[in-house]
Image: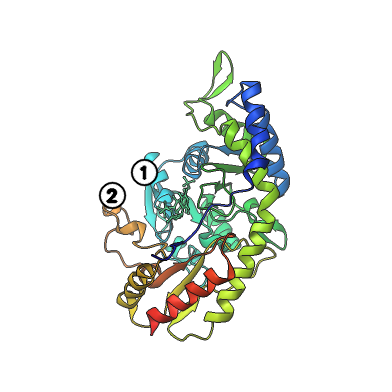
Amino acid sequence: MTRPLFVTRPLMPPLEEFLPSIEAIWKSGQVTNGGAFHQAFEAELARYLGVQYVSVVASGTVGLLLALRSLGLQGEVITSPYSFVATSHALLWLGLAPVFADIDPTSFNLDPAAVEAAITPRTCAILAVHTYGQPCDVEGLAAVAMRHGLKLVYDAAHAFGVCDEGGTILRYGNLSVLSFHGTKVFHTFEGGAVISPDAATKKEIDYLRNFGFVDEVTVVEAGMNGKMDELRAAFGLLQLKHVDAAIERRREIDAFYRQRLDRLEAIRCMPSPRVARFNFGYFPVFFETGGRDARDAAYEAMRAAGVMVRRYFHPLISDFPMYAASRGGGHAALPIARRCADSVLCLPIYPGMEDSDCERVVDALKAALA
Ligand code: T4K
């Protein structure tokens, strides 16, 4: 049986580099609640990302809940149907009504014109996603939010380390949320971070992630337990030392795929984003001919050959039963998002891939297309 090639594998630094941190945690007896590793990780992460106000949290999903909750929203939130379910689930958990708008065919992100067309008097916010790490039309979305007095939150789960000419794309909107899940470019097994625009907002997020405690006897909010523990914070600190090399290897794999696949007529690679720095977290290709049947046939054939491609993001979130009654949900026309969901196939990309693994992926895809 050939070794399976998964769509991703987590970046795991040498174990011996992590052991001293484990020893230090054992010695200190401080395992969570803002210990030394937590503080050091938050500070180092802010420096790495080029932002001032970072709150590390238990997961990207928890980060979304805290960020949205901090804004005191009520009513409808316009969001992308072309994402991982966590994006919209966070809205449902907060009693907010998701409204799905269509996406742009090049960036796979919310189309500002579609967002504007979906606004009603009940709309309070936009929850946009930097899908595959491709930046949203941040100016277009900011203009819509400004014109209609809406909050703007970015689900930046895929956007670790992505920069435009002005720096990190995490600086846009009211808040941005990263995921540090094991499948992400940068991970802490599970984890995430909320990026705030100012000290007051960070303080609010920090209260919310710790039950609302200000001190031992003062609770100012109905917060939750959204904290990151010491073990994961220590792992995050170590990951920061290795992530640049990992992104560089991802860049090489991305270039290899493009060089080998660009001339195939049946598929189109995701356009290379025009950014100052990208993270190469995903390598989606889109089937130009044959529609969903052709894509699904290739999906099955490649998996049978041990190349464990995934269909991120199919089905559309708006097609799941709990969204059937949402505006834009059920069978609503979201033609571009639907076309992407029906035609996408994500190829394996992770820093541990050998050149021969990449060859295997290309060969399996070509065989599936033949
Ligand atoms: N917003 C967006 C836009 C997101 O994409 C996500 C998460 C979130 C919000 C929420 O953030 P978190 O709360 O998760 O921090 C995966 C991840 O579970 C999920 O975190 C991620 N998005 C989503 C895009 O992908 P699955 O169901 O595809 O995961 P799974 O377990 O099938 O893993 C995929 C492959 O990765 C496996 O076939 C093998 C490899 N793998 C996975 C894990 C977990 C490993 O090699 N080792 C591992 O430990 O959802």
Q: Mark 2 and mark 1 in contact? Answer it, CB < 8 Å.
A: yes
Residue with the mark numbered 1:
92
Tag 2: residue type? Met
Q: Position of residue 180 (x, y in %)?
A: 55, 46
Tell me if residue 273 can be seen. Answer: no
Give the secondary structure at mark 1.
Answer: helix
Which residue is at the front of the view, 296 or 179? 296
| Residue drawn at the location 63% of the way across and 67% of the way down | 251
Tell me if residue 157 can be seen. Answer: yes
Q: Residues within 10 Å of mark 2 (few under 14, many from 20)?
A: few
Which residue is the extreme one toward the front?
Answer: 1
Tell me which numbered mark, 2 or 1, is placed earlier along the sequence. 1
Q: Position of residue 274 (x, y in %)?
A: 64, 70
Q: Which mark is residue 322?
A: 2
| Residue drawn at the location 67% of the way across and 43% of the way down | 238
Q: Position of residue 56 (x, y in %)?
A: 59, 38
Quadrant location, the N terminus: bottom left
Tag 1: residue type? Leu
Q: Position of residue 211 (x, y in %)?
A: 50, 25
Q: Is residue 107 left or right of residue 91?
A: right
Give the secondary structure at mark 2.
Answer: helix
Figure label count: 2
